[in-house]
């Protein structure tokens, strides 16, 4: 990571804006960048956001810095497209988020005394609810209307449940949530035990169970997406250990039985917990 650079941060931001303008220059710009639209960029933005998350999980500052730069470029790209269409500029984007942050932090910017964590969270949700109410008066919006349907499914479920909780549509504690999880698992079993399996019904029941598990995670103060990501990384590490153990014994996974691989799995698991 560069250090000791005397260039002011705002100069580098302006340099990035200039680079973006050059890439979009109709005469001398990059053909790929010139062909992009807001719609075509969205999948790259999602990929870059996940790459930032992976870099943070890896804990390497240089990698995090690099991936954040890729994500920042996405924002600058959208702003350039907005400027070209006459809809908004990067300054407008920065102004909008600054206004929102100041509005949502009156304990910092409006001289209000800060409360404890629960009071601050309630204040945050109340301000967001007021903002949504203002939109509803002009757009006749419903409570869940402004939650992006294209969010990753675990995040979508979490945001919907959290939003409904703001109007009291929520379980009071984890006990009934656990009951709901068990109920949904029983319904999956019923579909599996049915004389004729209906794939669509089975998919629906598994979806209900996943939704209930997200709700359980939320009630436990756990981010379901983060928990699943960590579990996936843990699985990958242990499975890699199984493969390495097999190689050390001149075996290949495809030639091993499930019981043999399970024995290796338990060995790797014990080693990881030691």
Image (cartoon, rainbow, N blue to C red):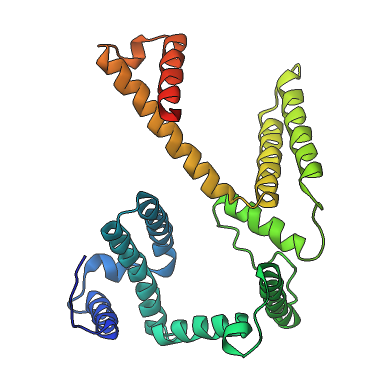
Q: Quick check: 20 above or below 160?
A: below
Left or right: 112, with 227 as reference point: right
Assign the C terminus to one quadrant of the image: top left
Q: Residue at x 43, y 20 (%)?
A: 265
Q: In the displayed structure, does residue 155 sit left or right of residue 82?
A: right
Judging depth in this view, the residue of 82 and 70 nearest the camera is: 70
Image position, residue 207 (x, y; %): 67, 40
Confirm whether residue 182 shows in the render.
yes
* Residue 61 x, y percent position in the rendering: 30, 59
Please identify the quarter of the rendering in which residue 126 is found.
Answer: bottom right
Work out whether 167 lies above or below 216: below
Q: Which x, y percent locates residue 204?
A: 70, 37
Q: Residue at x 31, y 16 (%)?
A: 246
Q: Nearer the viewer, residue 151 or 139?
A: 151
Q: Residue at x 44, y 65 (%)?
A: 39
> In the image, residue 91 lies at what x, y percent?
41, 87
Instruction: From this view, report whether residue 182 is shown above or below residue 24.
Output: above
Q: Residue 64 sits in which quadrant? A: bottom left
Horizontal side of 233 relative to 245 (left or right) equals: right
Above or below — where is 64 with respect to 86? above
Residue 51, quarter of picture? bottom left
- Residue positioned most to the bottom: 111
Q: Observer-nearest residue: 33 or 161?
A: 161
């Amino acid at each position: 990571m560069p250090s000791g650079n005397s260039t002011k941060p705002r100069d580098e931001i302006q340099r990035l804006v200039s680079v973006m303008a050059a890439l979009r220059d109709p005469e001398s710009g990059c053909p790929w960048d010139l062909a992009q639209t807001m719609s075509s960029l969205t999948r790259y933005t999602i990929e870059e956001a996940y790459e930032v998350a992976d870099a943070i999980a890896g804990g390497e500052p240089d990698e995090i810095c690099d991936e954040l730069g890729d994500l920042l470029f996405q924002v600058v790209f959208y702003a350039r497209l907005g400027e070209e269409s006459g809809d908004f500029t990067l300054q407008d984007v920065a102004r909008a988020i600054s206004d929102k942050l100041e509005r949502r932090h009156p304990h910092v910017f409006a001289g209000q005394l800060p409360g404890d964590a629960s009071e601050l969270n309630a204040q945050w949700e109340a301000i967001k609810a007021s903002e949504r109410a203002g939109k509803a008066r002009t757009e006749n919006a419903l409570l869940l209307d402004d939650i992006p349907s294209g969010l990753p499914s675990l995040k979508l479920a979490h945001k919907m449940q959290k939003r409904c909780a703001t109007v009291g549509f929520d379980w009071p504690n984890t006990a009934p949530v656990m009951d709901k999880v068990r109920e949904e698992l029983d319904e999956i079993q019923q579909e599996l035990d049915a004389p004729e399996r209906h794939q669509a019904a089975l998919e629906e029941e598994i979806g209900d169970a996943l939704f209930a598990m997200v709700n359980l995670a939320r009630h436990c103060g756990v981010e379901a997406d983060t928990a699943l990501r960590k579990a996936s990384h843990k699985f990958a590490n242990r499975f890699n250990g199984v493969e390495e153990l097999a190689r050390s014994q001149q075996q290949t996974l495809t030639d091993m039985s499930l019981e043999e691989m399970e024995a290796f799995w338990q060995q790797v698991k014990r080693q990881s917990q030691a």
